Image: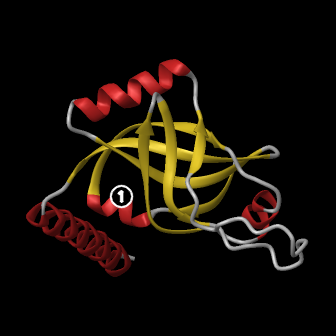
Amino acid sequence: MKVLATNRRARFDYDLGESMLAGISLEGHEVKVSRTAKPASRVPFIVIKHGEAYLMGSHITPYTQANNKLTIDPTRQRKLLLHRRQIDDLIAGKESGRSIVPTAFVLAGPFVKVELALGVGRKRYDKRAVLKARDDQRQTARELVQRARHRN
């Protein structure tokens, strides 16, 4: 699988748990654009309506060399292609207080798919703690490398 775009903000804002792949219902030139250019995700989110999942907030730019008669809204809602059991798992996760977060757009064979994860939102102090822990890990790694260099 080739990763087309990642939602780095999701890993910062949420404690992510289990993930799954879902197909996206794309029209016309959107597949070609998704393969060549990165699909821009401003603040994508998943909505479940009438037992079906939809991707909202993603922006796929129109293909410049496409027929001018094709005018597809770049920010339209896109249906996610999931099995009934997967949708039931997402609904159960949503009811338990978790959020459904798209984490990446991937190319699986000829298909463009989105990786979904169930996550719990982090508070501001949690985000600070994660940043501090990451900085501490980097600092200790640097010190270990420096000590190893001084020994040799």
Q: Is residue 127 above or below residue 64?
A: above
Q: Is residue 48 above or below residue 84?
A: below
Comparing 74 with 101, the one in front is: 74
Q: Is residue 145 above or below residue 114?
A: below
Q: What kind of element bears circle 1? A: helix
Comparing 130 with 142, the one in front is: 130
What's the residue at 59%, 63% (across, down)? 5
The amino acid type, in three-letter code, at marker 1 is Arg
What's the residue at 49%, 18% (across, down)? 85
Q: Quadrant of the C terminus?
A: bottom left
The x, y position of residue 93, in whole percent, is 30, 31
Question: Splitting the image into 4 quarters, where does residue 61 fall?
Answer: bottom right
The x, y position of residue 57, in whole percent, is 48, 62
Q: Farthest residue toward the top? A: 85
Q: Farthest residue toward the front? A: 69
Label 1 neighbourhood size at 10 Å, few (<14), some (14-19), many (20+)?
Answer: some
What colour-coding does the image apply?
secondary structure
Question: Splitting the image into 4 quarters, where does residue 73 fall?
Answer: bottom right
Left or right position of 130 against 77? left
The x, y position of residue 96, in whole percent, is 21, 30
What's the residue at 57%, 23% (across, down)? 83
Comparing 90 with 74, the one in front is: 74
Q: How many marks?
A: 1
Question: Splitting the image into 4 quarters, where does residue 22 fall?
Answer: top right
Left or right position of 32 against 138? right
The x, y position of residue 110, in whole percent, is 82, 46
What's the residue at 75%, 61% (across, down)? 30
Residue to which mark 1 is pinned: 11
Comparing 106 with 77, the one in front is: 77
Left or right position of 40 against 27? left
